[in-house]
Image (spheres, rainbow, N blue to C red):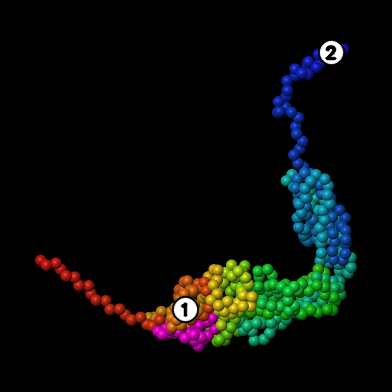
Amino acid sequence: MRLVRLALLLILWTLPTLPASHAAPPAQAGLPPAITTDPVSNLTSTSVTLNATVTPNGSPTTVQFLWGTDPIYDVRTTPARTVTGTMAQAVQATLTELQPGTTYFVQALARNANGAAEGLRRSFTTSGDPQQGADLSVAQLDSPDATVGKPITYTATIRNAGPLTATTTVLTATVPITAQIISSSPSIPTCSPLIYITNELRCTLGDLPAGARRTVQFVVIAAQAGHLLSTVSVASRTFDPNRLNNTDRLTTRVSAAPPGTTAELLVTPEGGGTLHITNTQGLTLSLVVPPRAVIKPTSIIYTDFPAAPPRPLHRGLTFAGRAFQFDTFQDGVIQPDFRLRHPAILTVQYDRQIVTATERLLLMRYNLREPNPTIAWQTFGITEQRVHGDLLHAQLPQLGEFALVLFPPTRPAAYLPLVRRLPPP
């Protein structure tokens, strides 16, 4: 027996090793996920928590819920969520603003690099009367005699006809980009403009009981004559059985700015700002301040001088009918001789009838740093200007006082014929 054992050991020791290609196959690299749709929880008349159990099987797995009132005609999805691991784990999603007394379906889905899986379709019914909810409505009025550059006050009235309380009520107001919302009542933190956007306002009004009413006022400055469309919308987390009255649109007729008008432009570092003025003569002026031209919120006050610039022009210069001033304020303090980080683009329309073919039109700026007032009107602070048709375009790295001027008519130059002396024969 002892000899047999020794012989077996010698045989095993002398057997050749199998190459790697003949080794046992490795375990499978990955499997599709597994998922089940679990019963819902926290079910109310307008909200529910969806539940599922997913097993990722070692690969990052994306999980979503399909839900709606009809699996064919009304299918919605929840935001995707990614899970990892090898063990089963719970996944949840919360739905709000559901309709009371309504049946919904829900189905959990999972997908990873190795395949997809879906749970069984379940259904749930919210409690309450299908017609119950918070019937919110909104209407607005504007102030009369709207003019370019002048404040226009809008009053939005929000009502809740019930029968339920409207929870987390939010009002949104929007005007065109050619206008700016400069203030509101109530103000921050209840109402505040959207980040970097001056033509939209958002007001968080909280809970609004049945039968209650709230009023919000916001002030708009229009930079362009014509029709100004103001849109206000209201919503809440409570189901609203009638959403046709949740939005109100009001068109305001904005008149051109009269001579001597003033207008305000609010400039932000991120968005810049644009001012567009049309006076009663139909002549336009626009100032476009690009983004990152200022380092903090800045207010630019435009003042029109239709008769003449406030400081007399130099001898030999003729007023061309357009003079204006841009006063700059930061933190409520005026900034004289203000310089922008990036030049603003100015476009001025002028009356072509006052300029003859032999005259030269030029935009000049009053240099406050020039000690001699007789030569203070200069092109210093204007990097580039050109005339095209009845429009003058200029780049302004500095703001201040400006005037369109005419140089005296040019006189024709006399040219004598060239006389050559021939060399002597």
Please give the label number shown on residue 4: 2
In which quadrant of the rendered image does the C terminus lie? bottom left
Q: Residue furthest bottom?
A: 307
In the rendering, at what x and y percent does residue 48 appear?
Answer: 85, 61
Question: What is the three-letter code of the residue carrying label 1?
Answer: Glu
Please give the label number shown on residue 28: none
On screen, residue 422 versus residue 224, left or right, reads: left
Q: Which residue is mark 1?
A: 370
Residue 416 within the magenta-colored segment of the rendering: no
**165 to 71, vertically: above or below:** below
Instruction: Answer yes or no: is residue 240 visible.
Output: no
Q: Residue furthest left?
A: 425
Say what secondary structure mark 1 lies in: loop
In the rendering, at what x and y percent does residue 152 appear?
Answer: 66, 82
Residue 306 within the magenta-colored segment of the rendering: yes
**33 to 384, vertically: above or below:** above
For image coordinates 73% across by 76% down, the residue present is 187
Say what secondary structure mark 2 lies in: helix
In the rendering, at what x and y percent does residue 254 appear?
Answer: 62, 82
Quarter assignment of residue 414: bottom left
Q: Nearer the viewer, residue 400 or 58?
A: 400
